[in-house]
Image (cartoon, rainbow, N blue to C red):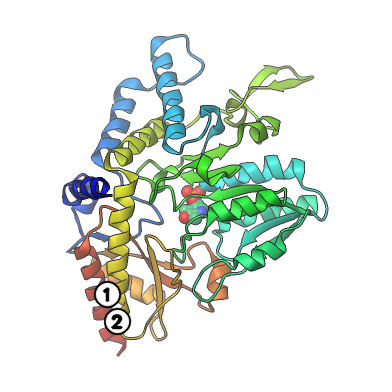
Amino acid sequence: MQETATKISAVDFDEIRKEFPVLHQEMNGHPLVYLDNAASSQMPVQVADRLDYYHRFEHSNVHRGIHTLSQRATDSYEAARKKIQVFINAADENEIIFTSGTTDSINLVANSYGMTNFSEGDEVILTEMEHHANIVPWQMVAQKTGAIIKVIPVTDSGELDIEAYKKLLSPRTKMVSVIHISNALGTINPVKEIVALAHEAGAVTLIDGAQSIPHQNIDIQDIGTDFYVFSSHKMCGPTGFGILYGRKDLLEAMPPYRGGGDMIDKVSFEETTYNVVPFRFEAGTPPIAASIGLSEAVDYLSAIGMDAIETQETKLVEYAVQELSAINGLRFIGEAKKRASVVSFVFDHIHASDLGTILDKQGIAVRTGHHCAQPIMRRFNVPATTRASIAFYNNKEDVDRLIEGINYAKSFFE
Ligand SMILES: *Cc1c(COP(=O)(O)O)cnc(C)c1O
């Protein structure tokens, strides 16, 4: 315990903040306060430099060339797969599929796994707090297969009703697909318990880890989930890239989702046979640079330590909640006992988009709107919230500037 505490306090987050050039500029005449990390995180110089070096000196296509440059690119690309496997403690590197992001990963599972395994009357369990990326692909596949979507309700404090979940599970449940940390409420869901209950019922599970991967240590084998998905751009990596983790035996039984180069074994006009996993799911020239960028981001996050990051972010979120609580008329949306990095709130007499605009004029970037989660907005009877989302490179001054900014905005409406 003592040892961990010393290690964590040894991380100098003021120094780390200096490694993010984007944070050290003015926006609308004020020093930028970036509190929109749940939409996309910022990139440290180490990752930007690595991408730059790749583009200047290492670029070539992968898996095709006999020449040395192509072999180097292939080695770096495959090393990224290994790095990500170790980062999330997956059992096998071939369980890591490169996609264009969380959305793409879920579409892949819904179309490949769902289309082959769902039939009329089968059930897919989601939650009321899902991101649209974990709703719409399942609806599309349900329409084609006759499967039915069931929804775990959310309590007034923004937590999942686990008793209701237990009642929804049945022999008809084929898939349970659940968000790990809510991007709209900040709730941390008990995914290990959710997965265990699903498995008892004979269902397969998918965890949307877009918000949990940048915030805490993820151990796939400990969670025990069959699929886990996340995006590179929310964990200090480049955009347009993401990961699908899938259990090997499930992936091996799944048909390809997209056809093209790289995913094949033999092609003729009469018949095509497919490549092995993971290549079967990576048609065409993959995002080579992005995979190398994410690999560097993983090194960067690992060097700081995910435990230190979690501790730092929790401290900042607690500070933000404490300071925001003191503002008259502010109402939190989402007050789960276990919450992370996201604080969502509303005012009865100030529209979120007006507040967001006034904050932006002061150089403060927050997100306003439905956060791609309209069902949970409806659940709380609000059209939109203002969301401040915190990363480890934020600091107390960022929170103080947010509070000042809100108080200034309030003065217009009183
Ligand atoms: C951002 C996000 C997504 C979508 O990620 P993309 O990178 O846009 O594909 C899905 N789920 C959650 C929880 C998110 O925060």
Direction from residue 358 to residue 202 in the image, left or right: right
Specify whether residue 100 is in view. Answer: no
Foreground pick, 82 / 27: 82
Q: Are marks 2 and 1 in contact (CB under 8 Å)?
A: yes
Direction from residue 247 to residue 394 in the image, left or right: left
Q: Which residue lies at the image location 59% right of the left edge and 46% below the top edge?
A: 106
Residue 24: give x, y in percent of width and height: 18, 52
Between the residue at mark 2 and the residue at mark 1, the CA separation in whole angstroms equals: 7 Å
Residue 37: give x, y in percent of width and height: 35, 56
Q: Which residue lies at the image location 45% right of the left edge and 69% below the top edge?
A: 336
Q: Is residue 342 above or below residue 191?
A: below
Q: Which of the 4 image quadrants contains residue 152?
A: bottom right
Q: Residue furthest right?
A: 120
Q: Which residue lies at the image location 28% right of the left edge and 61% below the top edge?
A: 315
What type is the residue that disc 2 sits on? Ile
Residue 337: give x, y in percent of width and height: 44, 68
Q: Is residue 105 above or below residue 402?
A: above
Secondary structure type for disc 2: loop
Circle 2 crowding by C-alpha within 10 Å: few under 14, some 14–19, many from 20 = few
Q: Is residue 297 above or below residue 33?
A: above
Q: Which residue lies at the image location 62% right of the left edge and 57% below the top edge?
A: 135
What type is the residue that disc 1 sits on? Glu
Circle 1 crowding by C-alpha within 10 Å: few under 14, some 14–19, many from 20 = some
Residue 281: give x, y in percent of width and height: 60, 31
Identify the residue position indicated by label 1 in the image: 323
Foreground pick, 308 / 398: 308
Identify the residue position indicated by label 2 in the image: 327
Secondary structure type for disc 1: helix
